[in-house]
Image (cartoon, rainbow, N blue to C red):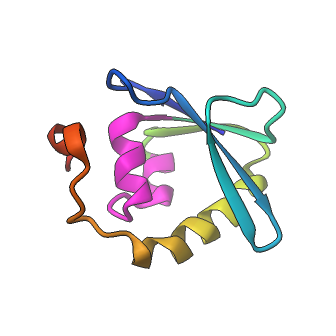
């Protein structure tokens, strides 16, 4: 589960990722039974998901805090990396434009 700080109005405060085998799902909101809780600023999360922020550097710099089983994040990181080539940074994202890096 990702918990965001400094979340803009109308954006979810948390996202719950579920990975089972080769399938993944993302749901808005928190799940108190999640194996891992990641706390990150909304802006840093956007950069991480877009491949503009290195997760290892973010952890070392304290920009990402992890509580729980850090090994449970490995499938999520692999899934995010495989999904990233399909992300289109030029897609109009409405009122999110002021948050671009």
Name, please, the residue furthest toward the left: 98
Q: Is residue 47 magenta?
A: yes
Q: Is residue 20 magenta?
A: no
User: Going by the image, does 69 lie left or right of 12?
Assistant: right
User: Going by the image, does 15 lie left or right of 54?
Assistant: right
Q: Position of residue 76 (x, y in %)?
A: 66, 60
Which residue is at 41% across, 78% downward? 85
**Bounds of the magenta span?**
40-60
User: Going by the image, does 83 lie left or right of 78?
Assistant: left
Which residue is at 74% across, 41% downward? 36
User: Going by the image, does 34 lie left or right of 53?
Assistant: right
Magenta segment, prevailing SS (helix, strand or loop): helix
The answer to whether residue 58 is above or below residue 51 is above
Q: Position of residue 62 (x, y in %)?
A: 46, 38
Q: Position of residue 55 (x, y in %)?
A: 48, 57
The answer to whether residue 42 is above or below residue 46 is above
Q: Nearer the viewer, residue 47 or 67?
A: 47
């Amino acid at each position: 589960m990702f918990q965001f700080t400094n979340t803009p109005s109308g954006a979810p405060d948390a996202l719950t990722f579920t990975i089972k085998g080769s399938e993944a799902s993302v749901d808005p909101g928190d799940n108190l039974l999640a194996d891992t809780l990641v706390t990150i600023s909304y802006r840093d999360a956007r950069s991480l998901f877009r491949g503009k922020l290195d997760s290892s550097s973010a952890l070392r710099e304290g920009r990402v805090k992890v509580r729980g089983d850090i090994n449970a994040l490995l499938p999520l990181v692999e899934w995010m990396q495989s999904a990233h080539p399909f992300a289109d940074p030029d897609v109009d994202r409405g009122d999110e434009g002021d948050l671009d890096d």
